[in-house]
Image (cartoon, coloured by chain):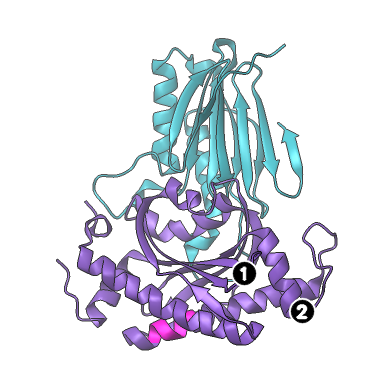
Chain colours: A cyan, B purple
Amino acid sequence: MNIIGNVVKVGIADLKITRAPEILRTSGLGSCVGVVVYDLSQRLAGMSHVMLPDSQLSKREDLNVLKYADTAIDLLVESLIKDGARTYALKAKIAGGAQMFSFSTSNDLLRVGSRNIEAVKQRLSLHRIPIQAEDVGGNSGRTIEFFPDTGILKVRTVNMGETEL
Amino acid sequence: MSFLENLSHYQLDILKEVGNIGSGNAATSLSKLLNRKVDMTTPSVKVVGFDEVMNLVGGPEKLIVSVFLRIQGEAPGSMYFVLDPNEAEQFARQVTGLKEFSFEQYPIDEVGLSALHEVGNILAGSYLSALSDFTNINMQPSVPSLNMDMAGAILSEGLMELSVESDYAIIIDTTISEEGEKSSLNGHFFLLPDPDSFRKIFRSLGVEDQ
């Protein structure tokens, strides 16, 4: 039987690390991507809610590293290792990156979903972290929950209910 | 620190007036459309963190119906007309006369959806045209998009432009509602100018940057 502890909430452009029995949750992912990196045997996991693909986009000097796929994933991996995760055991699951609005536009930022997915995958592969499961793209918002003891990622959408990855 | 996090009270008041003029015009349009009296609240201008934006409509997981459009032209930005699903249903029923219209009945009636889409379009359009006249800045609405989904997923799209510059959003929020009725409709207008647009709006209204 799984004992489910507190839910650790991850906000927009936020990152949290936790151990079982606590679970990680982020709500209302649109074009943002939820990235979970975990070490199952240590029952340790981190979740990042990435908003934008590349920290080069930032127009300010005091960069919020949690906002961008590249810098957030670097920090996610670093924090997990500091907490005792083993580099070779790290695995990832990702969800999000939807395109919420369908109109055609010259505005790149409205196609940010697919660019976020691509950037997240690229950064994970740079760290040699395999992606075990993904639920990305489409045009629905998602709420995700990750259970560090089983490695299960639950994805909930408004129209399609809940699935487990 | 970003420019957006350092607005003076005077500048915030100017933005309130901007919201007032836009939503006043939209409320008039709605009143004509429904042939009823429509009330509106004094706009509030909030400088909030991204997570708080979702809390304004009931949290990131709250189901909302929204008409979203991009503002194109000299002062680009994003604009939302947000309704609770129940209110949106009511809205569609009133406008179309389809008493049975519901989001839970699949397939959702196309006429009802299209009416909602159009109402959102009209309201956002009248909001923008008042705004454009007032500021003397050329602004055009994009084709609007009607969505029903989680607030977080929908509203975060409007934050993308801002997010490259700031961790805060300035939201000009006005509620319009039908007068007198108990089960009245409440619609939120959210106006989210892009960072550079604030400067343009202020300049055209004769307010210098601090």
Q: Which percent across, then down, holds residue B28?
A: 52, 84
Q: Chain of mark 1?
A: B
- First in sequence: mark 2 or mark 1? 2
Q: CA distance from mark 2 to mark 1?
A: 19 Å
Residue of label 2: B96
Q: Which amino acid is tagged 1?
A: Ser
- The correct choice, above or below, for B95 with respect to B174 in the image is below
Residue A76 on the magenta segment = no
Residues shaded magenta: B127-132
Tag 1's secondary structure? Answer: strand
Q: Which percent across, then down, holds residue B25?
A: 47, 83
**Circle 1: is it few (<14), some (14-19), or many (20+) Cα within 10 Å?**
some
> Quarter of the image containing the N terminus of chain A?
top right
Q: Which amino acid is tagged 2?
A: Thr
> Tag on residue B48?
none
Residue located at (84% from left, 68% from top)? B100
Residue B126 or residue A37, whichever sits in front: B126
Tell which tag, 2 or 1, sits nearer the viewer.
Answer: 2
Residue B140 at least partly seen: no
Tell me where residue B113 sits by quadrant: bottom right
Q: Which percent across, then down, holds residue B125?
A: 52, 82
Residue located at (34% from left, 49% from top)? B167
**Circle 2: is it few (<14), some (14-19), or many (20+) Cα within 10 Å?**
some
Q: Chain of mark 2?
A: B
> Tag on residue B145?
1
Residue located at (39% from left, 16% from top)? A82
Residue A61 at least partly seen: yes
Residue B80 or residue B177, whichever sits in front: B177
Is disc 2 in the same subunit as disc 1? yes
- The correct choice, above or below, for A149 with respect to B106 in the image is above
